[in-house]
Amino acid sequence: MFIRILCSSIIAFILAGCVTTPQEYKLKFAEVNEEYRQLANDLPHLRSASLSINVRKIEYKPLFIVTKSFGDVSFSDSSEDGYLDLLNPDFSRLSAPKGCQASQGSEEDAVNCFKGFSDYHEETSPFMTELSISSAEDGLKDIYKNLKGLDSLVSAIPQEQYQYLDDALSQVFDERYTLDSFSDAVEQFVARYNTEQFEDLVNVVSETKQAEALVLAEKLEKQKLLEEQRTAEEQAERFRRKSLIADHNAANKRAWSERKNFEYNLGDKICSYDNVMGFVEKVANDNVKIQTVGKAQHDLGFFFGNNSNPGASFNFTPMSMILWKTKSEVAPCSFSI
């Protein structure tokens, strides 16, 4: 069918010297898509599984003319960008391969040499895709024919096992296939496996995957418990630190509120509410002589309940002078400089 479309395109191009319009190509691809979707519909069990059979365009030059076809066939759990999914065929998804084109001398070389896809504006024309479809038509249809046997095997296993088909089939079909080699591999697989053997194969993969899932679940649960433990420890440490800060500031606030009642000895540490710190030089009734050593660069009351990080080092401005203060202006404090 597509050869007829292709021939008409070539004749129109030669006789009329014009290029087929995008709308005409869209209609042609819609017709081809419908044809191949009919073939895919004959594989209901493969189609209902979480499975794709991906194939891309290839180019190689065995003689003098560049051959355009399809290859690099593989099972996957989803359709890949730039590829045709044989179970849900849409030829408009195909992208032009980048690198390793035409210079390859065989189909196998073209399949094995792949460096991604060209950007959209560098895409090969739809006419080139037509050539690929035409040259690959027999190979594609042969694959669909052999996939019917695989679909029959799939029909014999429970549907809950379908989720493991991608892994099971990817382990068996683990090469980079041409259309012919993939078709042959499917045919040989179907001939080698009966329904019981196929179910055993999927069960082995299923058990392996479930065991891996269990190990992963246990690992994740352990990580979760460790994370919860770490979070609980961090919260406990924050609470402990918060309590220490609160107790520290509360004690220093009491010291300031009771400042008039303290008796001082020579050398005692003493501070003012504006953060001047020093040592007691002399006490005369309610007056205290202080040898200052510095002034903390913090908000007022830093030594008397306004310290958010007790025990940490703090910035201060050195100050060495003698000050006389009344007991109502100073209180015992703690500092280390």
Image (tube, rainbow, N blue to C red):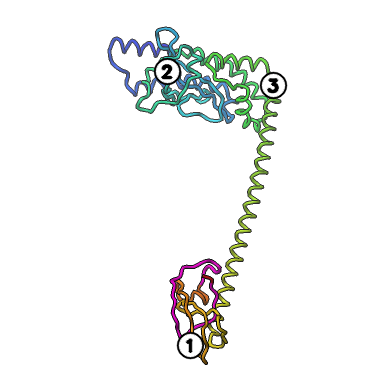
Residue 8 image offset from top left, x and y in percent: 36, 12
Indicate whether 12 appears above or below 126: above
Q: Which residue is mark 2?
A: 101
Q: Which residue is mark 1?
A: 326
Q: Which residue is mark 3?
A: 195
Q: Quadrant of the N terminus?
A: top left
Mark 2, Cα crowd under 10 Å, few <14 / some 14-19 / many 20+, is: many
Identify the residue at image location x=35%, y=11%. Answer: 10
Q: Count the numbered circles shown.
A: 3
Amino acid type of the residue that numbered disc 1 sits on in the rendered structure: Thr
Question: Alpha carbon of mark 3 to alpha carbon of mark 1: how far?
Answer: 101 Å
* Label number found at residue 41: none
**In the visual, does 176 lie left or right of 9?**
right
The mark that comes first in sequence, 3 or 2, is 2
Secondary structure, mark 1, is strand
Foreground pick, 313 / 123 = 313
Question: Alpha carbon of mark 1 to alpha carbon of mark 2: how far?
Answer: 95 Å
Mark 3, Cα crowd under 10 Å, few <14 / some 14-19 / many 20+, is: some
Question: Alpha carbon of mark 3 to alpha carbon of mark 2: how far?
Answer: 41 Å
**Magenta segment includes 333:** yes
Foreground pick, 247 / 131 = 247
Mark 1, Cα crowd under 10 Å, few <14 / some 14-19 / many 20+, is: some
Residue 130 image offset from top left, x and y in percent: 40, 17
The magenta stretch is 307-335
Secondary structure, mark 2, is loop
Which residue is the extreme one toward the bottom? 285
Secondary structure, mark 3, is helix
